[in-house]
C-alpha cells in the first residue's frame, strides 16, 4: 500500500538582509564577484534616495543586487516574491535568465526550484530604470527611483499548491454580491502541481461557514452565503471578513491562502455624487505619492503608518493612490481604516505606442493582485495621457484597457484622470465608466474662481455625466510667507488662501463624485527647480519628511475632521511689518474667540476660517479658543520682514514691483494680453517662441503640450507679465529683453 506524500506547509520568509548592491549590470557574476564590486545593503533599497530628490539629473540605468538563497528541506518548490522592483527586473541564477519583469510597482514571482538546492545558490537581480519607449512611466512629474524598494520573500511549498504563477496574484479570488440583508460570496482557487486530480479545496469564511469542493482541472469554485451581512461602510464601519482557501489531500491541509474582504455596494450618480450602500457618501480626500525625503520609494512600515495617520487626521473619506500600484500593505491599511481608494496604473502624461502591451500587463497585475480589497472602487486607466495629443491610437488603447478591466473585475468601475487641456467633448471623456479632471486654475493658469466656472459649465452642458476633481493644488514653500499673498509667490499663505476657496467651492457642488487634493505631501520630482527648492513638487499639505503640516492642512481638517480643534495660522510668519495684522484661525467649531496677550479681543462665528484684525506694537502672544480647544502663536512687529521669507528676487513678480518696464504708447509690452499681441503677425511669432520656452520650464513634463481652444481662450486673456510670473524663476535680463522686442512691434 503506497504511503501518502508528506505534507509540507507553505512557508513564507522575508529575505531583506544579506543583499549586495553594485551600481553596474553583472548578470553572470558569481557571489564573490558581486560582493567585491558592491556593498552590503538591507532591503528595501533605492540607489536614487539622494540624487532623485535634489534636482537636475539622477542616475537612470542598470544595477545589480545579489543574495545567497537555500531551499527549505522538504519543500518541493521554491519561489522568490518581489513586491516592487523599479522598473525592469531580470532574475538570474548561475547566469541563466529565469524571468524578465517590466513594471516597477507590482508584485511578481520567480520559480527558482531547479536552480536553488539546499546548498546556497546566488540569485542575481539586474534592475534597470533607464529611459525607454516600452515600459510606463517615462515622462511624469515624479522621480522614477531605481531599486528593489519593497520587500522580498522566499516562498516554499509542496508539490501541489495554490498557484503562484498567475500575474503575481494570491491564487485565490473572493467576490461578494449583496442581497437584501445577506451576501453571496463567490470564491475560486487556482491549483498547481501533480496531485490536482485527487485534491479538493475547502473554502472558509471565518465565523460564517465552510464548503468543500473537488478540484476540477486546475481550479475549484464555490459560493458561501453570509445570512446576516455586516457591510463595509467607510469610516463609520470598515468591517472586514476573512476568507480562506485550504487545499486538501484527503483530510490533510497541504496549502492555504487567506484574504480579507468587505461586503459593500456603491454607485455614482451625476447629480448626487458617490453613494455607499445606498447612502450619499461624499468622497473628499487627497492623493498620495509613496516616497519620503531621504528614503525615496524605499519606505518603512512606520512611514506608511505616518501617511495613514495624516489622512485620518484630516478626516478624509478617500485617497487616490497615484500614479501607480502602491504597496499591498497600504491597500490593507485603507481597508482597515475605511478609506475609499482610487487605484491606478502608471500610464501617464504621454502615450507610448510601444508600451501598449505593458499598460495591459500592469493593469492585469494591479487588478489580479488587489481585487479583494474592499476599499478600492475604481481602476484608473491613465493620468493626463493626452498632454502631447489624443489621436485614435490613444482612444483605441484605452478602449482595450477598459474592456480588459471589466473582464478581470466586473464589480468595479474604470476611471481616468484627464488633463485640464483635454476638450470636454473628446471621446476619452466618456470612454471609461467615470472620470475626473485635473484642474489647476489659480496656480498654473487663470484664477481660483475659474475652477467654479469650468465645473459649472461642464455640469450644465453634460448633466448626465458624473465628474470629479482628481487633482488641484498650489505649491508652497513654508519658508515663504506673505502679508499680501499672490498666485505664483510659492508662499504658505497663498496656498492656504487658495485651498480655502477650493473647499468652499467643492462644498457647494455635491454632485462632484470625488475630489482629491494634489497632494498629501511634497514629493520628489527630479526635473523641477522652482519655489526655492530643486527636485521637489511642493503642492503637499505636509512637508516631504511629514514633520511639518502647512496651514492648508488645517483648512481641510476644519472642513472634514470631527474631533474638535483650533489652529492659528501664520506661525511661521512671526515677524510682521504691518501696523495691523490679519490673524487667521482654522477650526471645525462654529465660534472662535481670540486673545492677545491674555486679553480677549473678540469672537467670530462662522465655518472653517475665522479672521481677526490685530494692531501690532511689539511682541504679542495670540491665542485662539474654540470650545475646549486652544492654540497659541507669537508674533512681533518689525520694520522690515526677513528677506528669507519672501520668494527670491530673481522671480519676475518681485522685480516688477521695483522697476516697471517701458510700455511706450502705440507699441506692445509685456503688460498686454497674449490675445492682443497675437493679433500682430510679428507678435504671434514672438509669443509662440515664448510659450514653447515656458512649456518646458518645469522639466520634461511640459514637452509637446497641446492647448485646446477653450483653454487657449483663458490663456489669451492673461497678460504676458502674469504668464511669466506664474512660470517663476525667469531671469530679469530675459524679461527685459523680451519687453524690448515687444516695444518695437506697433499695435
Image: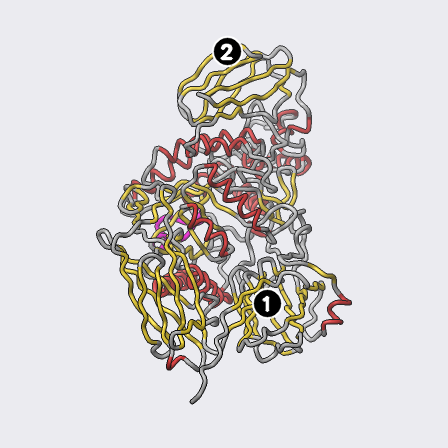
Residue 671, above or below 513: above
Residue 515, above or below 196: above
Nearest to the eye among marks 1 and 2: give it: 2
Q: What residue range appears in magenta? A: 416-430
Q: Residues within 10 Å of mark 2 (few under 14, many from 20)?
A: some
Q: How was this image coloured?
A: secondary structure
Residue 304 inside the magenta-drawn segment: no
* Picture quadrant where residue 205 is located: bottom left
Q: What residue is at 40 percent from the left and 40 percent from the top?
A: 284
Residue 77, above or below 722: below
Q: Is residue 105 left or right of residue 130?
A: left
Q: What residue is at 60 percent from the left and 70 percent from the top?
A: 90
Label 1 residue SS: strand
**Where's residue 249, x and y in %?**
40, 77
Q: Quadrant of the N terminus?
A: bottom left
Q: Visible in this render: residue 134?
A: no
Q: Which residue is mark 2?
A: 600
Say whether disc 1 or disc 2 marks the residue closer to the N-terminus: 1
Q: Is residue 607 left or right of residue 101?
A: left
Q: Which residue is mark 1?
A: 89
**Where's residue 319, x and y in %?**
44, 46
Q: What residue is at 69 percent from the left and 26 percent from the top?
A: 643
Q: Residue furthest left?
A: 180
Amino acid at each position: 500500500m503506497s504511503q501518502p506524500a508528506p505534507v509540507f506547509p507553505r512557508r513564507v520568509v522575508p529575505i531583506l538582509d544579506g543583499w549586495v548592491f553594485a551600481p553596474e549590470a553583472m548578470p553572470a557574476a558569481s557571489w564573490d564577484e558581486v560582493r567585491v564590486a558592491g556593498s552590503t545593503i538591507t532591503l528595501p533599497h533605492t540607489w536614487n534616495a539622494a540624487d532623485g530628490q535634489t534636482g537636475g539629473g539622477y542616475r537612470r540605468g542598470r544595477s545589480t543586487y545579489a543574495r545567497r538563497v537555500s531551499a527549505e528541506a522538504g519543500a518541493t518548490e521554491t519561489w522568490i516574491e518581489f513586491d516592487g522592483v523599479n522598473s525592469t527586473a531580470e532574475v538570474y541564477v548561475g547566469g541563466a535568465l529565469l524571468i524578465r519583469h517590466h513594471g516597477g510597482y507590482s508584485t511578481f514571482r520567480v520559480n527558482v526550484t531547479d536552480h536553488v538546492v539546499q546548498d546556497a545558490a546566488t540569485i542575481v537581480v539586474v534592475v534597470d530604470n533607464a529611459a525607454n519607449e516600452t515600459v510606463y512611466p517615462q515622462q511624469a512629474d515624479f522621480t522614477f527611483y531605481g531599486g528593489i524598494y519593497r520587500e522580498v520573500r522566499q516562498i516554499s511549498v509542496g508539490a501541489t499548491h495554490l498557484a503562484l504563477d498567475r500575474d503575481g496574484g494570491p491564487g485565490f479570488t473572493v467576490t461578494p454580491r449583496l442581497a437584501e440583508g445577506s451576501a453571496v460570496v463567490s470564491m475560486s482557487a487556482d491549483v498547481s502541481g501533480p496531485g490536482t486530480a485527487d485534491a479538493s479545496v475547502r473554502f472558509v469564511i471565518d465565523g460564517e461557514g465552510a464548503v468543500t469542493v473537488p478540484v476540477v482541472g486546475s481550479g475549484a469554485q464555490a459560493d458561501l452565503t453570509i445570512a446576516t451581512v455586516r457591510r463595509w461602510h467607510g469610516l463609520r464601519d470598515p468591517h472586514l471578513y476573512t476568507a480562506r482557501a485550504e487545499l486538501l489531500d484527503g483530510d490533510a491541509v497541504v496549502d492555504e491562502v487567506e484574504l480579507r474582504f468587505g461586503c459593500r455596494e456603491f454607485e455614482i450618480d451625476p447629480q448626487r455624487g458617490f453613494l455607499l450602500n445606498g447612502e450619499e457618501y461624499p468622497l473628499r480626500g487627497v492623493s498620495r505619492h509613496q516616497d519620503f525625503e531621504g528614503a525615496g520609494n524605499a519606505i518603512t512600515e512606520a512611514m506608511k503608518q505616518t501617511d495613514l495617520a495624516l489622512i485620518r487626521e484630516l478626516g478624509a473619506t478617500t485617497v487616490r493612490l497615484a500614479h501607480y500600484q502602491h504597496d499591498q500593505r497600504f491597500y490593507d491599511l485603507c481597508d482597515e481604516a475605511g478609506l475609499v481608494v482610487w487605484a491606478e496604473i502608471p500610464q501617464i502624461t504621454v502615450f507610448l505606442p510601444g508600451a501598449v502591451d505593458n499598460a495591459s500587463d500592469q493593469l492585469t497585475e494591479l487588478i489580479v493582485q488587489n481585487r479583494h480589497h474592499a476599499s478600492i472602487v475604481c481602476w484608473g486607466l491613465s493620468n493626463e495621457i493626452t498632454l502631447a495629443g489624443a489621436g485614435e491610437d490613444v482612444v483605441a488603447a484605452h478602449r482595450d484597457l477598459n474592456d480588459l478591466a471589466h473582464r478581470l473585475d466586473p464589480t468595479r468601475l474604470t476611471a481616468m484622470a484627464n488633463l485640464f487641456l483635454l476638450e470636454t467633448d473628446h471621446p476619452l471623456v466618456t470612454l471609461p465608466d467615470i472620470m475626473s479632471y485635473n484642474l489647476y486654475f489659480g496656480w498654473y493658469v487663470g484664477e481660483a474662481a475659474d475652477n467654479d466656472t469650468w465645473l459649472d459649465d461642464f455640469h450644465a452642458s453634460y448633466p448626465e455625466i458624473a465628474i470629479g476633481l482628481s487633482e488641484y493644488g498650489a505649491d508652497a514653500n513654508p519658508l515663504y510667507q506673505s502679508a499680501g499673498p499672490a498666485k505664483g509667490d510659492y508662499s504658505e499663505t497663498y496656498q492656504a488662501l487658495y485651498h480655502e476657496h477650493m473647499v468652499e467651492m467643492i462644498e457647494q457642488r455635491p454632485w462632484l463624485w470625488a475630489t482629491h487634493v494634489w497632494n498629501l505631501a511634497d514629493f520628489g520630482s527630479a526635473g523641477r527647480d522652482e519655489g526655492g527648492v530643486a527636485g521637489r513638487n511642493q503642492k503637499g499639505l505636509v512637508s516631504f519628511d511629514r514633520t511639518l503640516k502647512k496651514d492648508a492642512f488645517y483648512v481641510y481638517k476644519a472642513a472634514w475632521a470631527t474631533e474638535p480643534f483650533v489652529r492659528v495660522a501664520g506661525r511661521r510668519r512671526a515677524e510682521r511689518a504691518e501696523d495691523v495684522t490679519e490673524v487667521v484661525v482654522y477650526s471645525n467649531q462654529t465660534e472662535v474667540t481670540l486673545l492677545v496677550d491674555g486679553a480677549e479681543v473678540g469672537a467670530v462665528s462662522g465655518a472653517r476660517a475665522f479672521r481677526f484684525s490685530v494692531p501690532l506694537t511689539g511682541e504679542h502672544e495670540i491665542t485662539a479658543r474654540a470650545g475646549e480647544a486652544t492654540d497659541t502663536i507669537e508674533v512681533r512687529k518689525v520694520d522690515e520682514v526677513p528677506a528669507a521669507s519672501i520668494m527670491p528676487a530673481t522671480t519676475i513678480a518681485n522685480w516688477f514691483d521695483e522697476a516697471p518696464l517701458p510700455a511706450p504708447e502705440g507699441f506692445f509690452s509685456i503688460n498686454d494680453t497674449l490675445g492682443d499681441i497675437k493679433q500682430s503677425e510679428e507678435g504671434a511669432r514672438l509669443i509662440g517662441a515664448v510659450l514653447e520656452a515656458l512649456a518646458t520650464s518645469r522639466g520634461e513634463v511640459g514637452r509637446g503640450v497641446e492647448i485646446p481652444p477653450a483653454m487657449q481662450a483663458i490663456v489669451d486673456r492673461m497678460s504676458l507679465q502674469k504668464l511669466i510670473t506664474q512660470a517663476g524663476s525667469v531671469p530679469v535680463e530675459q524679461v527685459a529683453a523680451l519687453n524690448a522686442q515687444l516695444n518695437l512691434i506697433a499695435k
